[in-house]
Image (cartoon, helix red, strand yellow):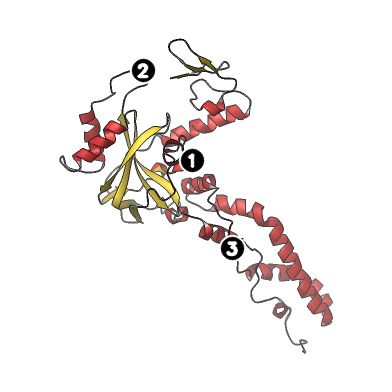
Amino acid sequence: MNTANQSWQSFVPPSVSLYHVDHRKDLDEHEDLQEQCIRKNSLDVIHEAVFDWYMEQERENLTDTIDEIERKMSEDGRYEEFKEHAEEISDLIYERNDTDPTEDLIRHSTVTNLFYSLGVEIDGYSACSNTRGESEAMACYKVRRALKLKKGQYDDEILELVQNASYGGELRIYFNAMFDKLLTHNQDADFRTIRFHGDVVVAIADSRNGSGYDITLPIDITFPFKRDNLFVDSQVHYSYADEICGMSNDWCDSTLWETSMKRSKSHIPTSTMTEHQLQETAYEKTFREGKCTFGDMNYKRHRNTFYINDFPCGSKCPHCGTFWID
């Protein structure tokens, strides 16, 4: 075939695959990255990770493609032209790349358990007291008000929720979603509302001490969208679905949701879980440095703990003095 009149661009394949993502590879084990993406409203964190994961594969495929182009142009007596346009050839290969490992990894992934905090704290029993921080009636009222329910609507279910979440906690709505569907990739144009409907999973969860309870209500409710109130459940210790209850991934599929850019005039309090996550990060940093922190109730972040059999019975950390009462 005579290619003397063809440009060097014709030697570059019209479609190039620089990446191959095995169908078994996904982001299910990287919910920490998903959480960071949600927090930053951007996929940049995952793009950076993917660059590291697939850098060698990209380099090998790019080299193989360039070598094949060099071979064909050399056979055609156009080696000098290849050398002259080597950098442009490389750029054109990238332009004609038809694979995106980030998209493939997301497509292979399953939905993620998330919760939307309503910014309402329910006071329950303290560890050393037989009295609640607030009455059951007040707790039920706070739940109804947050869910915009009238007195008499689902009173039995709400009372069940309050009574069984005996240590109190944060009022949340749990749902499943592909995390990337909760990104606008624009800090100046975020979602304005989030609607929950269907059989909505409502929970009171105490992530600090590891307790909680949930119910399902057939409601349809829209809240202003506040990104600081949106969390990947596994990334908040203690995780309600996993660490506290041991739920399967589909446990909150019944909650349907949708976001909107329509402006909302209502207000929702900010969740305290962002502060909790920052505290957890500080605890982890201290533990990695070989120390521990008084008041950190995560048993795994203490060393050489021992049990005291005298009243009040419990375990104690000899280094910082943290005590876990039975």
Instruction: Give the labeled residue for mark 1.
Output: 235
Q: Which mark is nearer the camera, 3 or 2?
A: 2
Q: Residue at x 33, y 54 (%)?
A: 256
| Kind of residue at badge 1 | Gln
Task: Quickly name the residue at label 3.
Answer: 100
Q: Give the x, y percent position of residue 181.
A: 43, 56
Where does residue 262 sit, x and y in percent of width and height? 31, 56
Query: Separation of disc 3 and disc 1 at Cα?
Result: 26 Å
Q: Nearer the viewer, mark 1 or mark 2?
A: 2
Q: Amino acid at mark 2?
A: Cys
Q: Which residue extends farthest front? A: 309
Q: Residues within 10 Å of mark 3 (few under 14, many from 20)?
A: some
Distance in Å between CA atoms under marks 1 and 2: 28 Å
Which x, y percent locates residue 55?
68, 56
* Residue 204 in view in this figure: no
Q: Secondary structure at mark 1?
A: helix
Q: Nearer the viewer, residue 12 or 118?
A: 118
The residue under the point 64% across, 74% down is 15
Q: Is residue 43 visible?
A: yes
Among the 4 quarters of the image, the one containing residue 216 = top left
Residues at marks 3 and 2, CA–CA distance in whole angstroms = 55 Å
Mark 2 sits on what residue? 128
Name the residue nearer the viewer: 200 or 119. Answer: 200
Circle 2 sits in a helix, a strand or a loop, which is it?
Answer: loop
